[in-house]
Image (cartoon, helix red, strand yellow):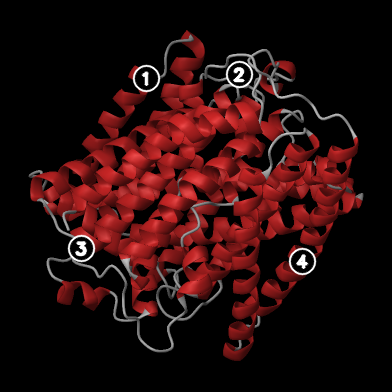
């Protein structure tokens, strides 16, 4: 089947989902109010609370949530066949991610832009707040560790990408200063930034910066570990800057990269008329992870991701200019990431190899599929770009820069969110020196995932493409389910339909709890004595929080049947 046919069909489904389903959610489920004063205005401080144009905010939100995960996860999941992978991406995006991301912004905005962990205390109870914050702490630790290693591996494999990625930082700061001081539109300056970035992709291909010899001289067994240390030193400083200095302008530049990358993928498919050579349903080797539940945790970002609720409530809600902007930022952000995940599936199933026999060499077993996922995507996109007469070497650097840019932005946001969470936990525990010391909290937010990223994990790929990825995916999806529980309780108490929230909630909690149990047995059997206790702790916290949420939801339903419910406005709404 021609890949372009599948791509057009998927994009059409996403468009219909936004046009109709998100409008239903906005009016009937979340009750958006154009007159509502958002926290960005009410609590404006010029650092975190900044009213932001919805298109600029979309750029920040999208690039913060669209890290390497919607590329790596789908590229691994094609191991079970491109059919199941794409089906989960489409259904998950329209009916789960859209509800989750959109709802997380709305609920946070209605509670003064509090984080989703704090909202668990407001909406469920105080115990739920602490439990959720602890789970979020583990998730952010895994997110930051995973993305650091992904970037490190890509820098080592693609030294031509180093120069353009590093230079994008001062470009973004300069653009941010220009926009802030002149109060001008971000569109033209950010497009100029993209043009300069892509010029340096060509320069970077000519002048690759390979630190492997330096890492070897310094005694690193894995060259990527030196990059991991450099990345966390950078994020320590970047996460302390006001959002308008670096985060917003770089995010807006990177949001253009999404559309450019998707354009390259789609045009490359169309010109080359590449056909999908991977099997629709793959006959996997005996002993491979079963499709249930592991497909649904391997593809996290791209179908639904709990990390999005942290971004939505941690930074996005603080910058939302109008209540009605939540539909565009949240639902379109989810659809954008679903589109990127679709592009990843097609890149590795149609762009990577010319025949099924060639393709099977990249997906011999699950270890091979997971270990080579990122490079498979880079090669697939490079082949699509080569159909457009872009030299293959330059095209490979372009694809690597896209992945690294998204992953680095997610690390910036992830470390910032980790600092927020550490301060909230410390405040609740009465440890005020950590809660009120920005530098100390930032150090903890950096050191914990740094240690996790540097742990040996078996082979060159380490934890990232092996067992750590599975635990990351499970914890990520579990967080999504728990965020949906918070949203479901709030929607029910508001007297609005809760079924659109409850269906993905139940599905995710079943899949993730199942995966946690299976992984716990595997970790114990394999002697993974770092990950086994971590898995067990997360599982206990999750079960406890699920029980608390179920009690709160039952109480909300009882109150809904005994008290007059809040009427759903019949006022015409446009957004």
Q: Position of residue 324 (x, y in %)?
A: 58, 21
Tell me, for residue 187, which label it has, or none: 1
| Residue visible at 64% across and 87% down in the picture | 524
| Residue visible at 80% across and 37% down in the picture | 493
Q: Position of residue 167 (x, y in %)?
A: 36, 38
User: Which one is in front in this view, the residue at disc 1 or the one at disc 4?
Assistant: 4
Image height of 82 relative to 233, above or below: below
Image height of 572 relative to 530, above or below: above
Label whose residue precedes the other's in the sequence (3 or 4): 3
Tell me, for residue 352, which label it has, or none: 3
User: Residue placed farthest to the front in the image?
Assistant: 561
Cα distance between the residues tagged 2 and 4: 36 Å
Cα distance between the residues tagged 3 and 4: 41 Å
User: Which secondary structure lies at badge 1?
Assistant: helix
Tell me, for residue 322, which label it has, or none: 2
Read off the residue under disc 4: 543
Label whose residue precedes the other's in the sequence (3 or 2): 2
Cα distance between the residues tagged 1 and 4: 46 Å
Label whose residue precedes the other's in the sequence (1 or 2): 1
Residue 476 seen in the current view: yes
| Residue visible at 61% across and 44% down in the picture | 500
Choose between 75 and 254: the one closer to the eye: 75
User: Which one is in front in this view, the residue at disc 3 or the one at disc 1?
Assistant: 3
Choose between 70 and 204: the one closer to the eye: 70
User: Which one is in front in this view, the residue at disc 1 or the one at disc 2?
Assistant: 2
Cα distance between the residues tagged 3 and 1: 34 Å
Query: Mark 1 and mark 3 in contact (Cβ < 8 Å)?
Result: no
């Amino acid at each position: 089947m021609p890949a372009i046919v599948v791509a057009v069909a998927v994009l059409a489904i996403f468009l219909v989902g936004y046009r109709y389903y998100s409008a239903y959610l906005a009016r009937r489920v979340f009750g958006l109010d154009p007159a509502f004063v958002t926290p960005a205005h009410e609590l404006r401080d010029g650092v975190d609370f900044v009213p932001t144009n919805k298109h600029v905010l979309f750029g920040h939100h999208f690039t913060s949530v669209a890290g390497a995960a919607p590329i790596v996860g789908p590229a691994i999941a094609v191991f079970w066949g491109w059919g199941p992978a794409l089906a989960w991406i489409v259904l998950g995006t329209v009916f789960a991610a859209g509800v989750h991301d959109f709802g997380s912004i709305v609920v946070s905005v209605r509670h003064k832009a509090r984080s989703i962990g704090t909202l668990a205390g407001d909406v469920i109870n105080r115990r739920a707040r602490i439990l959720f914050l602890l789970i979020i702490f583990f998730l952010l630790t895994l997110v930051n560790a995973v993305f650091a290693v992904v970037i490190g591996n890509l820098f080592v494999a693609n030294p031509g990408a180093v120069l353009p990625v590093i230079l994008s930082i001062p470009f973004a700061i300069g653009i941010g200063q220009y926009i802030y001081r002149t109060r001008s539109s971000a569109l033209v300056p950010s497009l100029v930034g993209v043009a300069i970035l892509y010029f340096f992709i060509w320069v970077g291909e000519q002048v690759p910066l390979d630190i492997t010899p330096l890492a070897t001289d310094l005694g690193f067994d894995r060259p990527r570990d030196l990059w991991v240390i450099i990345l966390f030193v950078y994020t320590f400083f970047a996460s302390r800057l006001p959002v308008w200095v670096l985060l917003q302008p770089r995010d807006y530049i990177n949001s253009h990269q999404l559309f450019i990358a998707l354009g390259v993928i789609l045009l490359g498919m169309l010109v080359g008329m590449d056909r999908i050579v991977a099997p629709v349903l793959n006959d996997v080797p005996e002993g491979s992870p079963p499709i249930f539940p592991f497909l649904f945790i391997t593809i996290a970002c791209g179908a639904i991701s709990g990390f999005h609720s942290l971004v939505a409530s941690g930074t996005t809600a603080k910058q939302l200019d109008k209540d009605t902007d939540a539909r565009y930022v949240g639902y379109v952000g989810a659809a954008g990431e679903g589109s990127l995940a679709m592009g990843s599936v097609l890149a590795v199933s149609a762009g990577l190899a010319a025949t099924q026999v060639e393709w099977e060499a990249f997906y011999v077993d699950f270890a091979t599929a997971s270990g080579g996922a990122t490079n498979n995507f880079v090669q697939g996109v490079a082949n699509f770009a080569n159909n457009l007469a872009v030299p293959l070497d330059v095209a490979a650097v372009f694809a690597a820069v896209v992945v690294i840019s998204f992953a680095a932005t997610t690390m910036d946001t992830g470390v910032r969110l980790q600092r927020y969470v550490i301060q909230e936990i410390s405040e609740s525990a009465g440890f005020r020196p950590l809660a009120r010391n920005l530098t100390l909290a930032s150090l903890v937010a950096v050191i914990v995932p740094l240690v996790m990223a540097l742990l040996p994990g078996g082979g060159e790929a380490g934890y990232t493409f092996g067992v750590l990825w599975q635990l990351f995916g499970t914890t990520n999806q579990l967080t999504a389910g728990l965020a949906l529980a918070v949203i479901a309780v709030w929607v029910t108490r508001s007297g609005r339909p809760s079924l659109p929230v409850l269906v993905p909630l139940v599905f995710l909690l079943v899949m993730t709890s199942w995966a946690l149990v299976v992984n716990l047995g595997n970790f114990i059997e394999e002697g993974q004595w770092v990950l086994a206790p971590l898995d067990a702790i997360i599982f206990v916290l999750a079960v406890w929080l699920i029980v608390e949420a179920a009690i709160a939801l039952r109480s909300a339903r009882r109150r809904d049947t005994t008290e007059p419910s809040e009427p759903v406005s019949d006022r015409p709404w446009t957004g």
